[in-house]
Amino acid sequence: MQTKMINVPENFIMGAAVSAWQTEGWSGKKDSQDSYLDLWYKNNQNVWHDGYGPAVATDFRNRYKEDIGYMKEIGLTHFRTSINWSRFLVDYENAVVDEDYAAYIDDMINELIANGIEPMLCLEHYEVPAVLFENYGGWGSEHVVELFVKYAETVFERYGDKVKHWFTFNEPVVVQTRVYLDAIRYPFEQNTKKWMQWNYNKALATAKVVALFRKTGLNKRGKIGVILNPEVTYARSTAPHDQEAARIYDLFFNRVFLDPSIKGEYPKELFELMEKHGITFEHTKEELQIIQTNTVDYVGLNLYFPHRVQARTSAWNERTPFHPAYYYEKFDLPGKKMNPYRGWEIYPQIMYDMALRMKEEYGNIEWFIAENGMGVEKEKRFKNKDGMIEDDYRIEFISDHLKWLLKAVEEGVNCTGYMLWAFSDNVSPMNAFKNRYGLVEINLEDNRNRKLKKSAYWFQKLIAERQFETIIEEYK
């Protein structure tokens, strides 16, 4: 078995991420400041693992200085989180700031910078205010798009002189896919056209905020982008019917955001399919022009697992509303390597394959891995006599994915960094603390106290030395 040392470029981002709603907790939150996630948790708490949710989370709101101390100890170059839109304002119509919450964000940013860590801020990580969801239908509303632009303007005014890395959304396809396409999350409404409208309005909101960012001159000192979660899609076979299944899946779930964000346009075939099935989103020529002329500076990509599809082997039930699965079904690859806790395939080559796609299809735009990581259940099993979790599986996962990513960088792909999900264990939708992703353990039985895992020390060494050893057999 051959090994080699993989070098990490000197200016390559080596950071970690979490979101506001998954860490902050409700400390200081007013009753009127629920987000969609808070609303879901309050109305459907029984589906959240062991009842944990955003109420306390990791209590980052009160313990951010302690956590940033751990970030510094690990050596993170960058840290990404979100500003919770529902918390940042007390009046969403007029963009009136909650000064207490805004002061916390101010202090958190200052603390990061003082510790040599570059802050990266996302404006929406599933945190659309609950009142806008209930009164206007959330991202189905053009009015909510305009309120988001107002919110962004207040944020830019407040922090634009300190923060260089900005993002409109994290995984903008996710909430509406779970709620309106698959109807598996509160309020459980299957409405494919509404799903497409949310997709479109978020793309439009990104373009409008990009335009605002440049109008205010913030582009002279920083960059703005969006964080997407394309599922690298593989067909079962080279047969035309399987290839078509993969292409259509890619259209509806990946290109629906990649293309407008980076190319400024939607694929012609997507419009044709939407028209055929009566799910075309409401739009105007003027809006499409805004999207065309306000593409992002860069993108973050969240990559965890591949998506494998094949042509349908059974007829679609025509009595049900249209779903893109009309054209495909999942393919279960025999012998695949799995993360049994999360139910996701482990296939590190997704990093390389997506990287080449960014180079060949998307103009080699600047991008970085915004999330990649491994969730494991009951990690306490792996504690040593000193109480440290020996998560060698996570070290293997990170190094295997990094080597494929850096192989692409060597071949000229314009990837500028790797961000681990996550800095610490945190709450996930429904799974809560069931699957742990962090470099830092959050001990729920001990007042949420923290402890570095073995992977944190490995990551620390990697960042300091800018190299790691890996097996090279997979390159053959």
Image (tube, rainbow, N blue to C red):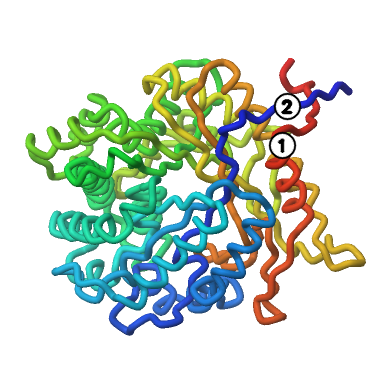
x 78%, y 30%: residue = 470
x 34%, y 72%: residue = 87
Q: Is residue 342 left or right of residue 294?
A: right
Which residue is at the far right? 385
Q: Amino acid at mark 2?
A: Ile
Q: In the image shown, does 242 or 263 lie closer to the viewer?
A: 263
- Give the image location of residue 366, x and y in percent: 42, 29
Quadrant assignment for the C terminus: top right
The CA span between labels 2 and 1 is 9 Å
x 45%, y 67%: residue = 21
User: Does label 2 or label 1 sit earlier along the sequence?
Assistant: 2
Q: Amino acid at mark 1?
A: Ser
Which secondary structure lies at badge 1? helix
On screen, residue 293 above or below 59 = above
On screen, residue 278 above or below 263 = below
Which of pointers 2 and 1 indicates the residue nearer the eye? 2
Give the number of the disc on residue 399.
1
- Give the image location of residue 401, x and y in percent: 65, 35
Q: Is residue 235 left or right of residue 474?
A: left
Q: Within the image, what quadrant is residue 379 found in?
A: bottom right
Neighbour class for label 1 at 10 Å: few (<14), some, many (≥20)? some
